[in-house]
Amino acid sequence: MFADEAYDALVVGARCAGAATAMLMARQGMRVLVIDRGGYGTDTISTHALMRGGVLQLHRWGILPRIQEADTPSVKTTTFHYADEAITVAIKPSNGVSALYAPRRTLLDRTLVDAAVSAGAVVRHGHTLINLTHRSDGRVCGGTVLDGDRNISQVQADVVVGADGSGSSVARLAGAETLVQARHTTAVLFGYFPGIELPGYHWWFRPGIGAGAIPTNCARHCVFVAIAPERLRNCPSQHDRLALFTELLRQADPALGELVAGIEPDGPLRVFGGRCGFLRQAHGPGWALVGDAGYFKDPLTAHGITDALRDAELLADAVVDGVMAKYAAARDDLSRPLFEVTDAIAGLNWGLEQIKVLHQALNESMKREVVHLLTLGDAHAAMREEVL
Ligand SMILES: Cc1cc2nc3c(=O)[nH]c(=O)nc-3n(C[C@H](O)[C@H](O)[C@H](O)COP(=O)(O)OP(=O)(O)OC[C@H]3O[C@@H](n4cnc5c(N)ncnc54)[C@H](O)[C@@H]3O)c2cc1C
């Protein structure tokens, strides 16, 4: 029970966005309570590819060694397959990042939670935010929390951070406005396959379909296909889905289809039915949103975790400085181009030359994001030269 406890921040959601935000706030001396309705170290529906900005953050925060020590494969190349054409790009070492990584969420989220606890944050799993509390002037000043034994308690906090995912209760209860709505979404089928010899990230694109193979922990590849959601609707059973998955991999690339067809995945395929992206108002009086709660985009550009880690730092700094407008301005400025290009890619209605142009635009947005991350803190000023 923590009925009479008061904190500087109550963070709702203890995955990549919430745990990272809590860790950074606690490292700067704030008293932070993090709650999550789920369990410590559990999985979630997501693939795992981190982009340079995300790895850079983990490196700067001192988290990367634990990810590497857990035998997370290092990714030194990214290969884009446009129908039968393959373009391989080497990951250029810079700013302490010599490879990319795709850790399982059971590892990444747990590591961030551990780091938040080490920094002094209090973390409670099995606790659900069910309401926000307000001062007489309307400012949010805490929340009502239900624990696993169905006890209800009130938590006071100067700021409530919604890191509670795309269906965010904090966003709904605070009345956060939707600033931009995406037009497209993909549905994703993915599974974990042993014995695949494909170094680096691989992404396949043909009109109407995207696919990927991502090396992750336990010597597995996370292999996915992304299609229009209506194509999944006639596949209610696991058997139907596996057949569709294999067929779609063949359509994306016959060699990939052959490679995966003979391999039994670990357990059933995972399904994401699709959800249109949005950019919500970043903050209001006494509350803020971070990660998918505030900014959700289609998974096909594999950038949600990287952006969640980015926004954790932008938000923690803004809260500590007491200038929340700074968070909204930076988040929106960096997010809008990524959001728009992701939406265009998720439409799956491009031609092969057009998707290459979209990838160039995505790459420019990612570079801009990395440059911005390097501006956070004087200690990183010298590193900035390498990217520019
Ligand atoms: C199919 C798919 C594939 C993806 N692949 C990639 C990829 O390869 N690379 C990448 O970077 N991104 C990827 N993403 C995006 C990525 O998964 C998200 O951007 C990321 O999970 C956002 O993290 P988060 O911490 O904001 O939210 P979440 O991971 O959604 O965590 C929210 C947490 O809040 C908790 N919560 C919710 N409501 C409450 C409440 N009321 N009280 C207490 N706790 C609550 C939940 O239990 C949950 O643990 C993918 C997404 C999908 C769907």
Image (spheres, rainbow, N blue to C red):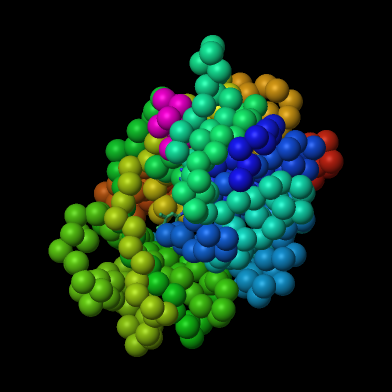
Q: Which residues are magenta?
A: 169-176
Q: For the image shown, how many numbered marks are present on the structure?
A: 0
Residue 65 percent coordinates (x, y): 75, 65
> In this image, 132 relative to 65: left or right?
left
Q: Is residue 21 visible?
A: no
Q: Nearer the viewer, residue 23 or 86?
A: 23
Q: Is residue 25 magenta?
A: no
User: In the displayed image of the protein, which residue is found farthest to the bottom?
Assistant: 262
Residue 182 percent coordinates (x, y): 34, 37
Quadrant where the C terminus lies? top right
Q: Nearer the viewer, residue 201 or 274?
A: 274
Quadrant where the N terminus lies? top right
Q: Residue at x 72, y 52 (%)?
A: 117
Q: Nearer the viewer, residue 154 or 93?
A: 154
Q: Residue at x 46, y 27 (%)?
A: 174
Q: Nearer the viewer, residue 357 or 166?
A: 166
> In this image, 121 relative to 255: left or right?
right
Q: Is residue 175 magenta?
A: yes
Res 99 quadrant in image: bottom right
Q: Residue at x 39, y 36 (%)?
A: 278
> In this image, 288 relative to 184: left or right?
right
> In this image, 263 relative to 284: left or right?
left
